[in-house]
Amino acid sequence: QTLCTTLIGSMPQSVLFRGGADARAIRADGEAVCVTDADDKLLANANLAILANGVDAKSFIADGAPWLRAVRGQVTEIAATVPKMRAPVCREGYITPLLGGRHYVGATFDESGIAAIVTSEDQRANLRRAARILPGTFEDAGLDADSGWAAVRCVSRDRLPVMGPVGANLFCCLGLGSRGFSWAPLAAETLASLIAGAPVALERSMMRRLSGSRFTVATG
């Protein structure tokens, strides 16, 4: 949220942010795209729209996007244990250096649940993960029952991002999964270039692998 707020604030003449709007439908109206709420009240209209709202995008895509699914993940906070740690350590998960006096360890990947609630089972799983990543450091670390947070990822069937057109003047950037910070900058630049008709940074073969059409099975 802080990152998004910072990016929006850096482009005050280019971006108008409207939060708290309960968008329920997106439809083409001539050459424009209209976004309306549950009462069919117009919230916004533009030349095109981009879906970047995770699994909630399923309700705006014609086929319901069965190739997207929700996967719950939980991150755990651990009291200062390695004060001289200067960089994140990644291996089957990650441990951060101290941030506000705490390490952050994650994250679980739970395909059986979508409730964004912190569970003690996943807290213990993350503590075991930390001990495996840096043996001999976190085995005796303590944690509070609520010292973590959980959220729901948007994951595609093949775990690659999905970007490109999904309807008339409707595009998407979805399925970043557990690698959002890695994929998002490249995905955003690529999608903007695609829409503008500019050269993209990815090869054609990779663009085909990231297109939503890859999940369409030809019949007949």
Image (spheres, rainbow, N blue to C red):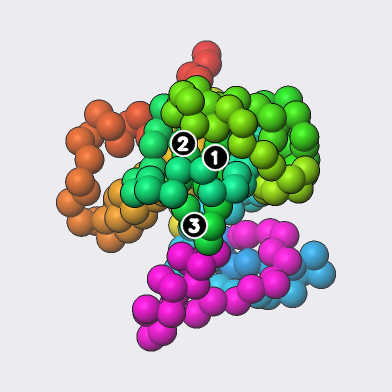
The answer to if 124 sits in the magenta stretch is: no
Report crowding for label 3: few under 14, some 14 to 19, many 20 or more residues within 10 A (C-alpha): few
Residue at 20%, 36% in the rendered image: 203
**Do the numbered discs 1 and 2 sit on residues whose CB atoms are within 8 Å?**
yes
**Mark 1 or mark 3: whose residue is earlier in sequence:** 3
Q: Please name which of the two marks, 3 or 2, marks the residue nearer to the observer.
A: 3
Residue 212: give x, y in percent of width and height. 46, 36
As measured in the structure, the alpha-carbon distance from the residue carrying label 1 to the one carrying label 3 is 11 Å
Residue 141 found in image quarter: top right
> Which residue appears farthest toward the top when viewing the image?
220
In terms of secondary structure, where does tag 3 sit? Answer: loop
> Which residue appears farthest toward the right when viewing the image?
39
Task: Tell me if 172 is positioned left or right of 206 in this view.
Answer: right
Please state which of residues 159 and 74 is positioned toward the viewer in this rendering: 74
**Mark 3 or mark 2: whose residue is earlier in sequence:** 2
Please state which of residues 113 and 201 is positioned toward the viewer in this rendering: 113
Q: Quadrant of the N terminus?
A: bottom right
Residue to which mark 2 is pinned: 94
As measured in the structure, the alpha-carbon distance from the residue carrying label 3 to the one carrying label 2 is 14 Å
**Mark 1 or mark 2: whose residue is earlier in sequence:** 2
Residue to which mark 1 is pinned: 105
**Do the numbered discs 1 and 3 sit on residues whose CB atoms are within 8 Å?**
no
* Image disc number at residue 99: 3
Q: Amino acid at mark 2?
A: Tyr
Q: How many numbered tags mark residues here? A: 3
Residue at 37%, 79% in the rendered image: 11
Q: Amino acid at mark 3?
A: Leu
Residue 129 found in image quarter: top right
Residue 148: give x, y in percent of width and height. 67, 47
Residue at 51%, 43% in the rendered image: 81
